[in-house]
């Protein structure tokens, strides 16, 4: 009498370790959590599945928090594939521990696994969900308050800039004494105040690297503006063209600095 070999997973749909690894590389731990959960459901272990999915979500959150904490200079040196490769390997080993026995038996009994393309689809969907979450955190999370505070503080900076540049429109319409008075009591003090605004901003706790970089450029720009207006003062006061070449050089540097600031804003 021939004894039928027991095949407990013959009629259930399981994702292979390979499929889970591919989905994880694409979509991160949240994809792994979902696929492991689906496997546990098929294996009649729904509670373990829920735990796996929750762990996948939490792991994704912790991973991105960790990435955000790495200094940008260091992060730029890490090859793009390294981080996904590391967490994919970790997930692979975890799946081996949690479901390795069942998945190996399923394979040895020559049962079919769910198509790897379905796992890829889960990975892609997970990737989009993760990206949406990251953007939501950046714009609406606690860190966004720093950007809002920064923008509010620099409203005065740009207002000072706008008002000071009106000076150039008045050069041919005001007396030398009026222009000197305006430079000493309004224009130059506005840029000195702008420097104070930058310094106050730099003292903000946990100011992001991109804002610190922007402040460096704004500081250089502000110092150039002060230098330019002081040279204008000398030209007016001494009624001399001696400072014109130096003034032109400063304005060229100002134009270059503005382009740097603009390019940084577009990144």
Image (cartoon, rainbow, N blue to C red):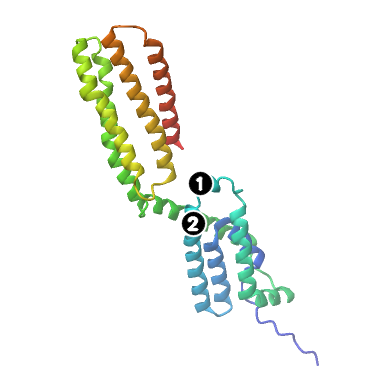
Secondary element type, mark 2 = helix
User: Residue 143 location in percent, x, y?
Assistant: 37, 52
User: Residue 39 location in percent, x, y?
Assistant: 58, 73
Determine whether 134 is above or below 56 in the image.
above
Looking at the rendering, in which quadrant would you find the N terminus? Answer: bottom right
Q: Is residue 101 left or right of residue 254?
A: right
The residue labelled by disc 2 is 64
User: Residue 240 location in percent, x, y?
Assistant: 32, 6
Task: Name the quadrant containing residue 43.
Answer: bottom right
First-in-chain label (1 vs 2): 2
Q: Residue at x 23, y 21 (%)?
A: 184
Q: Residue furthest bottom?
A: 1
The residue labelled by disc 1 is 72
| Number of callouts | 2
Determine whether 157 is above or below 116 in the image.
above
Q: Which of 116 and 129 lies nearest the eye of the viewer?
A: 129
Q: Which residue lies furthest to the right in this view?
A: 1
Task: Name the quadrant containing residue 3.
Answer: bottom right
Q: In this view, does 261 lie to the left or right of 92?
A: left
């Amino acid at each position: 009498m021939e004894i039928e070999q027991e095949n407990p997973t013959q009629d259930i749909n399981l994702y292979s370790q390979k499929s889970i690894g591919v989905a994880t590389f694409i979509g991160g731990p949240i994809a792994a959590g979902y696929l492991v959960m689906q496997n546990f459901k098929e294996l009649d272990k729904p509670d373990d599945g829920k735990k796996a999915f929750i762990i996948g979500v939490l792991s994704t959150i912790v991973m991105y928090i960790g990435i955000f904490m790495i200094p940008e200079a260091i992060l730029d040196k890490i090859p793009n594939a390294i981080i996904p490769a590391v967490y994919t390997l970790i997930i692979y080993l975890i799946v081996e521990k949690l479901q390795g026995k069942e998945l190996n038996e399923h394979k040895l009994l020559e049962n079919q696994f769910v198509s790897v393309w379905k796992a890829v689809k889960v990975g892609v969907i997970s990737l989009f969900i993760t990206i949406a979450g990251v953007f939501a955190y950046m714009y609406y999370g606690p860190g966004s308050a720093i950007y809002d505070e920064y923008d509010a503080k620099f409203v005065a900076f740009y207002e000072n800039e706008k008002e000071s540049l009106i000076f150039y429109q008045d050069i041919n319409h005001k007396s030398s004494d009026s222009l000197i008075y305006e430079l000493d009591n309004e224009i130059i003090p506005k840029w000195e105040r702008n420097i104070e605004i930058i310094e106050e901003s730099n003292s903000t706790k946990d100011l992001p690297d991109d804002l610190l970089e922007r402040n460096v450029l704004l500081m250089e720009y502000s110092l150039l503006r002060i230098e330019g207006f002081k040279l204008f003062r000398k030209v007016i006061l001494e009624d001399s063209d001696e400072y014109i070449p130096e003034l032109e050089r400063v304005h060229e540097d100002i134009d270059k600095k503005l382009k740097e600031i603009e390019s940084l804003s577009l990144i």
